[in-house]
Image (cartoon, rainbow, N blue to C red):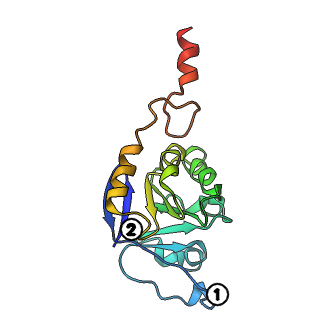
Amino acid sequence: MSKLIKNGRLSDDAAQILVLDETQAPEALTLPDGPVFVPLAVWQAHKGVLASRSDVGVWLDSHERVEELADDLGTLSAIALNFPKFTDGRAYSEAALLRSRYGFTGEIRAIGDVLRDQFFYMQRCGFDAIQPKAGKYSDVQLEAALASLNDFSEPYQAAVDHATPLFRRAQRSA
């Protein structure tokens, strides 16, 4: 079972991240029971059946856009955004769009190559769940990462988490 940081707490997570290989057609796939995140192509192929399941989320790869899910956001309780490598930051923008433009209130999960140094910034962009690759961090390291989420007491710029940036507070008091 993988570990997950969700809403500032460390917990076990039973959800599967379903990944297709090149030989699998989304239309022919048999979906597992239990909590699962399916790729966008699988969601699009099986939307009629999956929309009624509360334990199904959709995951988007870095080249896919949340606009493709805009009409389905009311039926989804969770969306995962993939970081295929830590230097690919497109998922930050997609999370911010989900929260600010689309008003998505469900879970936004960071999956893939997520690093401890990025957790704070992920939260500022709208992620409320962070799932590092299995085995990447020990429980002790994840507990330390939880504590580090509070390392910065004053944000310098606005974000979707609505914390008031330091420079705006200074302008109001002047």
Residue at horizontal 38%, vertical 56%? 5
Residue 168 x/y as whole percent = 57, 21
Q: Secondary structure at mark 1?
A: loop
Q: Amino acid at mark 2?
A: Ser
Residue 7 visible in the snapshot: no
* Residue 170 location (% of width, % of height): 55, 16
Residue at x 40% of width, y 39% of height = 150
Residue type at mark 1? Glu
Residue 18 rendering spot, x and y as whole percentages: 49, 78
Sequence-first disc among 2 and 1: 1
- Residue bearing the label numbered 1: 22
Instruction: Using a 10 Å C-alpha cutoff, classify the residue at mark 1 as few (fewer than 14 neighbours), some (14 to 19) or many (20 or more).
Output: few
Q: Give the residue pinned by disc 2.
A: 54
Quick one: quadrant of the C terminus? top right
Vertical side of 7 occupied by 23: above or below: below
Q: Quadrant of residue 140?
A: bottom left
Q: Residue furthest top?
A: 174
Residue most extreme to the right: 63
**Rendered image: mark on residue 62:** none
Query: Is mark 2 in CB contact (under 8 Å) with mark 1?
Result: no
53 and 165: which is toward the camera: 165
Q: Is residue 128 placed above or below 171 in the rendered structure?
A: below
Residue 39 in view here: yes
Q: Residues within 10 Å of mark 2 (few under 14, many from 20)?
A: some
Q: Residue at x 31, y 65 (%)?
A: 12
